[in-house]
Image (cartoon, helix red, strand yellow):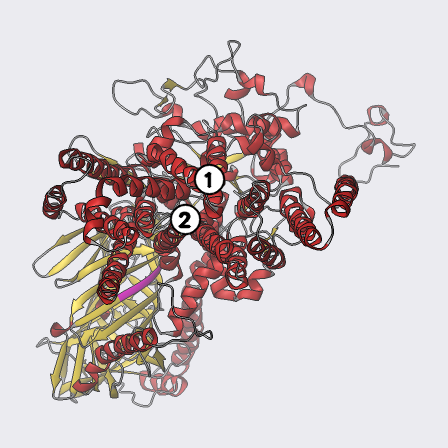
Amino acid sequence: MNKTPKMLNSKVAGYSSLITFAILLIAWLAGFSSRLFAVIRFESIIHEFDPWFNYRATAYMVQHGWYKFLNWFDERAWYPLGRIVGGTVYPGLMITSGGIHWLLNILNIPVHIRDICVFLAPVFSGLTSISTYLLTKELWSSGAGLFAASFIAIVPGYISRSVAGSYDNEGIAIFALQFTYFLWVRSVKTGSVFWSAGAALSYFYMVSAWGGYVFIINLIPLHVFVLLIMGRYSPRLLTSYSTFYILGLLFSMQIPFVGFQPIRTSEHMAALGVFVLLMAVATLRHLQSVLSRNEFRKLFIVGGLLVGVGVFVAVVVLTMLGVVAPWSGRFYSLWDTGYAKIHIPIIASVSEHQPTTWFSFFFDLHILVCAFPVGVWYCIKQINDERVFVVLYAISAVYFAGVMVRLMLTLTPVVCMLAGVAFSGLLDVFLQEDSSKRMGSAIHAAAEVDEAEDSIEKKTLYDKAGKLKHRTKHDAQQDTGISSNLKSIVILAVLMLLMMFAVHCTWVTSNAYSSPSIVLAFHNSQDGSRNILDDFREAYYWLSQNTADDARVMSWWDYGYQIAGMANRTTLVDNNTWNNSHIALVGKAMSSTEEKSYEIMTSLDVDYVLVIFGGVIGYSGDDINKFLWMVRIAEGEHPKDIKESDYFTDRGEFRVDAEGAPALLNCLMYKLSYYRFGELKLDYRGPSGYDRTRNAVIGNKDFDLTYLEEAYTTEHWLVRIYRVKKPHEFNRPALKAKERTIPPGNSISRKNAKRRKGYIRNRPVVIKGKRTLK
Amino acid sequence: MPKSGERATLAKPAPNVLKLPYRFDILLKYVSKFELKMGTNFVIYLALGALLCLSKVQAEIVNLNVERSLDLTSQLVRATTKISTEDTAGKPISEYVFFVDEPSLAYISVKDNADKNVQIRKNELAKGEESYTLTFPKAAAKQTFVVETVSSKNILPHPLEIRQNDKQFVKYIGHLHFYSKYKTNSQKTSAKLSSSNILSHTQVKPFSVASTKITFGPYENVEAFSLEPLVIHYENSSPFVTVNSLERTLEISHWGNIAVKESIQMTHTGAKLKGSFSRYDFQKEARSGQSALKSYKTYLPASASGVYYRDTNGNISTSNMNSGRDFIELELRPRFPLFGGWKTQYTLGYNVPSYEYMFSDGNKYQLKMHLIDHIYDNMAIDEATIKIILPEGSSDIKLSTPYTISRLPNELVHTYLDTTGRPVISFSKSNLVESHISDFTLYYSFSKISLLQEPLLVSGFIYIIFVFTIVFLRLDFSITSHSHKE
């Protein structure tokens, strides 16, 4: 009697581990391959802006070694300031890909570092889905875990940051985030030092990889704090949190970029506070067991007051002394969405720092965004220690995702997990009972059925829909509480939803997130052929081949990393926007007249100026469209010279045509964008100088450049590079007679008493060949 | 944006051109002095022979008729010289010394009447003059043969810098008379130019100009070592592009594939671009940037597959491939048009099946492939390095080349699944032109069994992993004795 179910159980366990393995493998493969759209359509190439810096840094590390990398002073960025790279990056990404490269090279597999960088994020997406599975399994059941793993493998919210070529911190950080949370939940559950030390190690990796580690170091203390408030204190909690906090603190301080921040900045103070609180609670608990009730009450009141006042005074004093730094601007903008727009235009100018729209929630998460509250409800209904965690995770992530588009990324994993819980719970109701009759243990059965269902769901992706029908029929034969018709209808509906989700994910990935953005492709409507605009690389390669090795290129900061990465030339500002005043200076140069900006450019030793101009092909992300941000940032630092209102018309419009503001029509950016564009006729009927991006004929057509000359313009005019002339190379523009001033002083001082003004007029005695008398 | 590197490469040939005639001038004066005093040719040649340290001087040889035709349409000077020679004493001629009158000679070949190759031996440089001794297959009193030479960097842009819309003018500086150590009875030189727009040329009568062709001569009874300059200043809009360095890597796999990879660095060595580059003019005006290199054709073997064309920034998306019957025509466009003084770099690679190039006899193998391949028409390569990566375990390697090369030390390279490393044969050669496209032969031996090494390695590795997993999962490593929960 006793043996049969056990054997059955072990058999089921064998099958379920096989199914788990198979589903996770398929999820990995599906996640990996759906991220390859860009590679297949274009090529194995690094995308966008930041990845170019990461790639360049990785290549430098691979070439020069780890210690040289840590000490790397990059004189090609932020000219003339330079940048200490080793101390201003999160090196986890570079170490990861450099380590893989090193390992492969030891095995004599000569893979280029670029290919490792390109495929790193897709490979890590598989690891993310495995750690999501583990975390969800800890929280709910392995069935829900498999759902969550399958969801996160293909959900667009995560794919947007981890397609092949998008070599950025987030690609590996989400894995580290999920894995840290998994280890943390495990350690809270078991109270074992082993798991919490593991969580601290994983946290260390996260700190080395992404600035988002602050999310962990605030969420875990929050979890502990809420557990304390809920009266769920346990020695397990004490062990796991104190181990995690101390080890994690020490580990995180090993990263040069983080340094002493964990003990000095306000972002990290919550963790310390909770640690102290936890210690206090533990002490009180201990005292409670030792002292009598009366003594304990006295001690509690006095001690509590003293400690409270002491901590408060200490924090205030330390903040005033400047030991604890105030909150950083980017952090403020998390709480006050209007903060950045007023105080830090440079943060507000980045599109991914904008608040999220409702549309993008659905776009990135599709059906999951609806299933996710159900999961939260399930978790709250059957609350325990670790479900408190996931509820807190969900609430905070939803808030942050609403503030910044970029933080959609931290919301995605928890949405996947809770949607997995929701779907699993739903299928539990509709599939559990009939299975329970067959199997011995209800939990096992539920898990098994979930897995089976999940595998069917996975199979629908791989066009094996035939089995699906059979399965539902088979279930329907069982006669239980809910009518079989209802069951099959519900299951079919759920499967339909999941199928649509898969279709949506693939569609979004292929259309929205798989463009490398340095290569543009468009379909020719006439013959259906695919044309490629490769202007960016054309220009960067021209710079790398045909300019002096130490040439300094001025451009708006968006293109700094690309210029450094692809053209290998010195830039003035780049995407690491650490120095606002330097950026403002470049913004001022772009928005001043040619003459004034020449002064700025010579003072900064600029050799070339690079502008992006989309007017010929109708590319909307060009510099004229970004121009107002340049003006705003410049105005922030130089309010006397640059005024945003000057660049608008009287009616408050920003226009480039004849009605545009004169300050705009004569500024450097305008001239560099439209130089000789006024002569260009894009089609036979239209007027010349018609800007396709802004749908207007440009206002200032006929002008010449005095201080600069066109050095190169790409095939579709997308990138225009100008050379700044040296002072001896141009004719200074003639001054009008009344504007001329004769420099005083110098000429007079050389004259002695005899050679005063007017002296020569009186003595016109100059005999040729003879010396004039003195 | 003049760069020091570019200037150096451009400036190099100039002193050579100037130096040589100058030195010849001194020589000529010296010779004519002797002539005045002694009055006999014999003595002069003896003295000259001693001077030039040449051992075999046969004063009796006279060039009866020399017809030179210079092809100056591209950046290369292709000279075809038809020489009829005779020994005045009636002795059979078996050897003839041919002097090269142009610096940086890239290629020379000599054919006799019956279109057979004549043996050439390069003499030691005497006072910077390059000369070759030709050995005829059959000694005869009268010999007629054709010498073909190709030289690069003898046509120089003049002026050195032009604006974008300007035409490119070049100057050819050579010798009006056939430069020979023998007396020439009658000679004629014709120069074929790229356009009829001739600014100036040497005016020694008789000469005639017919649109793109100038004929000089016939000139009668020209003394030996005569040095009359020939200068032609004319329009030449063809892009002067030089490959500064070519690195060609051939990786041989005995699984049936040969991977070819060529890394090319090229410079436009014509007239440099002065002032700004205007995209508007380049797109709208036909006469803009005529001498710029916009695209060119590369011919690959017909069996080539998996062609890639890329640089450090990735794939260069502007190329077209047309497969012909005998070859593949690849139309390559650099990322940007190459104007004078501009540079670019790229890598071109493809695979060819090995059965077309590899022959075997048991364990002995023979590889026969082009030493260099076509890059663009009228190409000029400054320096080429060829690397041949043989499979792991190849031995008894012997290389034979159609012309002299300089061998570089052998290396070992480790790639996929290698243990001991693959031997790499490498050699280099400078100043190459299209005529150098010919086969080298590499002999080596390789045992067929070692072909199995790599699959065995992989399967062994996987096998070990499985065994390890099986063992590991069945062992209990826990310290505590309680049973597992699940």
Question: On the rendered image, what quadrant is the C terminus of chain B found in?
Answer: bottom left
Q: Is residue A723 left or right of residue A370?
A: right
Where on the picture, by quarter, is residue A357?
A: top left
Q: Is residue A632 above or below residue A154?
A: above
In the picture shown, does residue A360 fall above or below A82?
above
**Subunit of mark 1?**
A
Q: Earlier in the sequence, mark 1 or mark 2?
A: 2
In the image, A415 versus B453, the foreground residue is A415
Tell me where residue A60 appears, x and y as whole percent.
Answer: 50, 60
Name the kind of residue labelled 2 in the image.
Leu
Alpha carbon distance from label 1 to label 2: 11 Å
Residue A471 to residue B304: above or below: above
| Residue assigned mark 2 | A139
Q: Position of residue A273 (x, y in %)?
A: 67, 45
Can see residue A451? yes
Residue under label 1? A391
Secondary structure character of the magenta stretch overall: strand
Horizontal arrangement in the rendering, residue B96 relative to residue B357 (left or right): right
Quarter where residue A457 is shown: top left
Residue B264 drawn in magenta = yes
Horizontal placement of A449 versus A518: left or right? left
Q: Is A553 in front, or is B56?
A: A553
Whether residue A533 is visible to the viewer of this picture, yes or no, is no
Kindly check if marks 1 and 2 are in contact, taking CB atoms under 8 A apart as contact.
no
Specify whether residue B389 is painted magenta.
no
Instruction: Read off the chain for label 2.
Output: A
Say which element carries label 1. Answer: helix
The boundaries of the magenta stretch are B261-268
Give the residue drawn at x 22%, y 43%.
Answer: A431
Amino acid tagged 1: Val
How many residues crowd mark 2 within 10 Å: few (<14), some (14–19), many (20+)? Answer: many
* Quadrant hosting residue B397: bottom left
